[in-house]
Image (tube, rainbow, N blue to C red):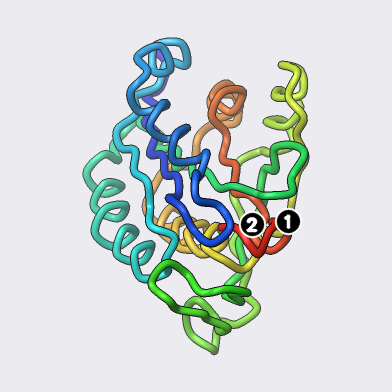
Amino acid sequence: MAPCLKVIITGFGPFAGVQNNPTQHLCEWLATEPSVSSRCNVEIIHAETLCVAAQDVDEWTQHQLCPLLEKESGPGCTILVLHLGVHGSATCINLERCAANMADFRSPDQRGCKLSEPIEGSSMQGLTRSTALDLERAASMLKGMGHQVQLSCDAGRFLCNWVYYRSLGLCQHSCEVPSQDRADEQNGHDQCQHQDSNRAAPGQHQ
């Protein structure tokens, strides 16, 4: 019997320069389209559109993601957390390898906060958290399906990076990392697309 793969998905709502955020629509579609779960042999256990604000992301990771990981984790079960973000000037899908412990908002978030500081603890400034998933193989599979994909080591310094950093901190300590073959099987459909934050146009993106 194949191991159980449960998926948690987030997108982002509107923000400066992006009033109609495609990740919101994609997140909603993935959560409601029955063929996604059946075709990919996964169980989508939670999908949510996040407000583009540091406070909201922190509240979500603390009050939604953390309890979900604790509740849904179990023997033989893998949880994949999929964050979708928009890159206003991208020409392909970016698979982000890592997130940095640094916020540097070029414009305020949706709550009016314009931060330029470590996400957590000045003593941890410079820390980078990386995914354990084999993104090289994921990118190869996606390219084989006709998608334009590249690997990235810069998720920006806005909310894409923020949620990725928070999520990796929880996942690295509390959830099981997928086996390489199982993760790659799903990555052909749903791999994390944390888009680079600081290169969006106009202004900035998540």
**Type of residue at label 2?**
Cys
Structural crowding at the residue carrying mark 1, measured as other residues with C-alpha within 10 Å and reported as few (<14), some (14–19) or many (≥20)? some
**Type of residue at label 1?**
Cys
Where the C terminus falls, by quadrant? bottom right
Residue 180: which quarter of the image?
Answer: top right
User: Could you say whether the residue bearing mark 2 is in a helix, strand or loop?
Assistant: strand
Q: Nearer the viewer, residue 28 or 181?
A: 28
Residue 168, image x and y in percent?
49, 56
User: Could you say whether the residue bearing mark 1 is in a helix, strand or loop?
Assistant: loop
Residue 204, image x and y in percent?
64, 62
Structural crowding at the residue carrying mark 2, measured as other residues with C-alpha within 10 Å and reported as few (<14), some (14–19) or many (≥20)? some
30 to 164, vertically: above or below = above
Identity of the residue drawn at 42% across and 69% down: 54
Marker count (numbered): 2
Residue 83, image x and y in percent?
49, 45
Identity of the residue drawn at 60% across and 58% down: 205
Identity of the residue drawn at 37% across and 46% down: 49
Residue 57: which quarter of the image?
Answer: bottom left
110 to 33, vertically: above or below = below
Identity of the residue drawn at 54% across and 24% down: 186
The residue at which mark 2 appears reads as: 98
- Can residue 102 be seen by looking at this rendering? no
Which numbered disc, 1 or 2, marks the residue that appears first in the sequence?
2
From mark 1 to mark 2, how far is it between C-alphas? Answer: 6 Å
Q: Is residue 174 left or right of residue 98?
A: left
Residue 128: which quarter of the image?
Answer: bottom right
141 to 6, vertically: above or below = above
Asked if the residue under mark 2 is in contact with the one under mark 1, i.e. CB atoms within 8 Å, the reply is yes
Residue 144, image x and y in percent?
76, 18
The residue at which mark 1 appears reads as: 153
- Can residue 62 be seen by looking at this rendering? yes
Q: Is residue 159 left or right of residue 154?
A: left
